[in-house]
Amino acid sequence: MKKIRKKIFLWQGLDLHEQFQEGSVRAVSKEEAYFLLMERNIELISIKKQFSFFLFQKPITQKHVMDFLRKLSLLLESHIPLEKALRLCVSSEKKSLFSSVINNILQSIEKGLSFSEALHQEHALFDASLIHFIQFGEQTGYLLPILHKILTLHEHLETSKKKIKKALLYPCALLLISFLMVAGMLFFVLPQFQQIFSEFGAPLPKSTEIVFNITLLLKQWGLFLFIFFIFLFFCIGSFYQKNIFFQKKIHHLYLRIPFLSSLLNHTYQSRFYYLLATSLTSNLPMVHALLLLRKHFKHHSYATICQTLYHSILEGESLHQSLLKTHLFEKIDCHLIAMAEESGQLTSMLEHLSHQHQQQLDGLLDLLGNLLEPCMMIFIGFLIGGLIIILYLPIFNVGAVIS
């Protein structure tokens, strides 16, 4: 089925109270935009398609979504009705691309849909598990607490991402500079040595000759190799997106790489405990919460675990017994959950375990930042030092060549 792409139309008009209003609306055509605005009782003065050349249009990111939810939660916390809060969010976004998304949500609510149903209309931007959590919050009256929990989780994720970027930024910059230096030495310095030795009719040392041949190969086929690897990268990425079996194999492989597996396990287990505790706090049955978590996790191993836990608990097993069978959760966690189930303190224990795994994740990220930089310096030292020795090795034989 072909996906219909909606355009953005900027409009100006008068509302029922003859007050001037302006904004944006997403529609397939100008006629549909007219119809949508007529449903909102807007008497149009002007309407035009927004200029959306992709080089100048800022794409909608997850940051826009979370900023919107943060503003909305603050307004709802101030006892402002949902529709009025959405209008305030639209006015704060001005004429950005995301303002049309909020406008669509507002229009859907005005037609009689619930907030979660309106978000589902924009499912390309809002995660399925987020929509389900909001839907349950509406049904139980826990919408505001659930929004706060979702935002807190997102803040933890953003903090972890910033730590990873900070740990990788400096080593990557050093690596880029070192490769530029190596390229300069290979393409500009090495040919000078080759020319001097060829004038004297003497061969280059074997190691220098090998490096020189590699340089010639890169000069002749470098552009072709670059295009080939870019094409190969996109082919593998496309195949990865479309092939579920390949994704499962890659995700399973991630959990076998020593340091990476610890990072992933602490990340996903902290998220698992946090969202499960949030669900139980909102009086959501555990089996329904596990179904929501299965939709939340993009990692196939943890999505499968949530599905397995769902079936195990339906069969009458306790949570700690089901977790022990997965062989991914730590035994100490399972024992603590068992004691919490007996004492009726499961929610607080899950929050404690989530916090504990988040602390361990932060420790690993700090360790990554502290270790990566010296390791990269050693690698660069060996790379440039070895190349300098290979390049300047002919100088030691210059006297013999001249004589």
Image (spheres, grey):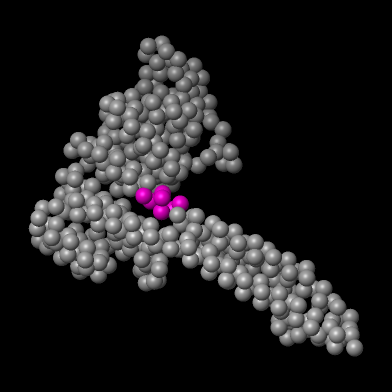
Quarter holding the C terminus? bottom right
Farthest residue, direction top:
18
- Residues 343 and 298: in front is 343
Image quarter for residue 31?
top left
Rendering coords of residue 213 (x, y %): 73, 78
- Residues 160 and 113: in front is 160
Q: Is residue 158 magenta?
A: yes
Query: Could you tell whether 61 is left or right of 146 in the image?
Result: right
In the image, residue 195 above or below residue 1: below
- Residues 60 and 337: in front is 337
Q: Can the viewer see residue 268 in this picture? A: no
Image quarter for residue 83?
top left
Helix, strand or loop: magenta stretch: helix
Q: Is residue 275 magenta?
A: no
Rendering coords of residue 310 (x, y %): 19, 58
Q: Residue at x 27, y 29 (%)?
A: 112
Q: Residue at x 39, y 32 (%)?
A: 102
Q: In the rendered picture of this protein, how many numbered marks are placed on residues?
A: 0
In the image, residue 25 above or below residue 271: above
| Range of magenta residues | 156-162
Q: Residue at x 45, y 54 (%)?
A: 163
Rendering coords of residue 372 (x, y %): 50, 65
Q: Residue at x 76, y 77 (%)?
A: 392
Q: Can the viewer see residue 102 in this picture? A: yes
Rendering coords of residue 386 (x, y %): 66, 77
In the image, residue 350 above or below residue 247: above
